[in-house]
C-alpha cells in the first residue's frame, strides 16, 4: 500500500514573535507523504526543517510561536483544527519523532525504562510488568546489550549513540505509522550512524513505516530516502525523487549544496565549492526570491517577485521555485 497517502501538509505558515520582530520560520510549505515512503528534508541550519515538523505535531510553543495558517491532514483529518487532547492521541501513537538532541530530550532523573514504558501505558493501556517486558524487547531490538539491566539505568549512564537508540526505542514503542527523525545521527561516529540509519530503513521495509528524515547531510539522504524536499529561508525551493535531484538539480541552491560535497573523483588539489554569502534574516526577508543575493544566475525579476512553485514540464513529481524555469511570458 505504498501509494496510500498518509500525510498531507498544505500551506503551512509558522511564525515566532520576538522583541526584534516576527520570524517567518515556515512560509507556505506543502508536501505529501505516502505509506512506507522515506522523505528527506534538507537545507542549511535555520531553513525551517525542524520547525516544519514540529508544526506537523502541533508542538510550537504558544504564544511565542504560532501556526498562523495551513493544514496537516493525517489520514484526511486536519490535526491543526483539533483540540490538544485529540492531537495528543495521535502524537506518539501514530506519529512519533526522534528529537535532535537526546541528552536534552530525555529526562535526566527518570530511568530510561520508565521513559519508554510511559508511552506504552498511555497509548496501549499496558500493565506495569507487560510494559517493562516490552521496553526490554525494544532495547534489544535497537541493539543495546544487557537490556534487562540497562533498562534500570539513567540517561547519563549511556553514551551519545546509546541515548539516541533509547530515543528511537521511545519513538517506536507505540508502532507508529509515521516516524519523524530530526538529525538522528548528529554528533555520532560513522559506525553508530550507519547502524541507526539501517535500523530506520528496516522499519520502513519491514513494517511500512513512513519516514521523514530531517538533515543537512546529503550523504544520508542519498543513502536512505526515496524523495527529497530542499528548504531555504522557510520555503521548499525544490522537490524531486532522490535520483533526479542528485543527477539533475534544478534550483541554484540545490546545485550549490551538491557541489559543496567532497567527492573522491575530484582533483584532490581542487578547493571545495561554497555558496557565497549567508542565509537571510527571517525577520526582514528581502523582496523577491530569498536566495537571490547568493545566486549566480540572478535576474532582475528575482529581486522583485517571489517565484511560484511549478511542476517541471513533463514531470508529475518534480517541482521547483525559481524564475529560471518560469516562461518569460509569465514573469508578470
Image (cartoon, rainbow, N blue to C red):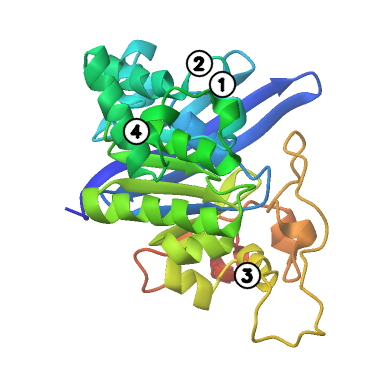
Give the mark nearer the N terminus: 1 vs 4. Answer: 1
Q: Residues within 10 Å of mark 1 (few under 14, many from 20)?
A: some
Give the mark nearer the N terminus: 3 vs 4. Answer: 4
Q: Residues within 10 Å of mark 3 (few under 14, many from 20)?
A: some
Q: Residue 224: percent from the left, percent from the top? A: 42, 61
Q: Which residue is mark 4?
A: 95
Asked whether the residues under the numbered discs 1 and 3 touch, taking CB atoms below 8 Å apart as contact, a structural biologist would say no
Among all residues in the image, which is located at the extreme left? Answer: 1
Q: Secondary structure at mark 2?
A: loop
Alpha carbon separation for disc pair 1 and 3: 33 Å
Q: Residue at x 68, y 46 (%)?
A: 45
Alpha carbon separation for disc pair 2 and 3: 42 Å
Alpha carbon separation for disc pair 2 and 1: 31 Å
| Residue 182 visible in the displayed image | yes
Q: Which residue is mark 1?
A: 66
Give the mark nearer the N terminus: 1 vs 3. Answer: 1
Residue 256 lies left or right of residue 48; in this view the side is right
Amino acid at each position: 500500500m505504498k501509494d496510500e497517502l498518509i500525510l498531507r501538509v498544505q500551506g503551512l505558515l509558522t511564525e515566532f514573535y520576538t522583541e526584534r520582530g516576527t520570524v517567518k520560520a515556515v512560509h507556505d510549505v506543502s508536501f505529501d507523504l505516502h505509506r512506507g515512503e522515506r522523505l528527506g528534508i534538507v537545507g542549511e541550519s535555520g531553513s525551517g526543517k525542524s520547525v516544519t515538523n514540529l508544526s506537523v505535531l502541533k508542538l510550537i510553543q504558544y504564544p511565542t510561536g504560532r501556526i498562523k495558517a495551513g493544514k496537516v491532514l493525517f489520514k484526511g483529518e486536519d490535526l491543526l483544527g483539533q483540540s490538544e487532547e485529540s492531537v495528543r492521541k495521535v502524537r506518539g501513537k501514530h506519529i512519533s519523532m526522534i528529537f535532535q538532541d537526546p541528552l536534552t530530550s530525555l529526562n535526566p532523573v527518570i530511568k530510561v525504562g520508565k521513559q519508554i514504558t510511559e508511552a506504552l501505558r498511555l497509548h496501549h493501556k499496558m500493565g506495569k510488568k507487560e510494559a517493562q517486558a516490552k521496553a526490554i524487547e525494544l532495547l534489544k531490538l535497537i541493539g543495546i546489550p544487557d537490556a534487562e539491566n540497562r533498562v534500570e539505568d539513567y540517561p547519563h549512564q549511556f553514551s551519545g549513540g546509546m541515548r539516541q537508540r533509547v530515543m528511537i526505542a521511545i519513538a517506536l514503542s507505540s508502532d507508529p505509522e509515521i516516524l519523524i527523525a530530526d538529525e538522528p545521527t548528529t554528533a555520532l561516529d560513522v559506525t553508530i550512524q550507519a547502524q541507526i540509519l539501517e535500523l530506520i530503513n528496516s522499519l520502513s521495509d519491514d513494517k511500512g513505516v513512513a519516514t521523514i528524515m530531517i538533515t543537512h547531510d546529503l550523504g544520508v539522504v542519498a543513502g536512505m530516502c526515496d524523495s527529497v524536499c530542499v528548504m531555504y529561508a522557510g520555503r521548499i525551493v525544490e522537490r524531486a525523487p532522490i535520483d533526479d535531484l542528485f543527477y539533475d538539480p534544478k534550483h541554484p541552491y540545490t546545485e550549490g549544496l551538491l557541489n559543496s560535497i567532497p567527492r573522491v573523483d575530484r582533483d584532490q588539489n581542487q578547493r571545495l565549492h561554497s555558496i557565497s554569502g549567508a542565509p537571510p534574516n527571517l525577520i526582514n526577508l528581502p523582496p523577491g526570491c530569498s536566495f537571490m543575493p547568493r545566486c549566480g544566475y540572478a535576474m532582475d525579476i528575482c529581486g522583485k517577485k517571489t517565484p511560484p512553485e511549478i511542476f517541471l514540464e513533463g514531470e508529475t513529481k518534480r517541482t521547483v521555485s525559481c524564475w529560471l524555469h518560469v516562461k518569460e511570458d509569465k514573469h508578470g
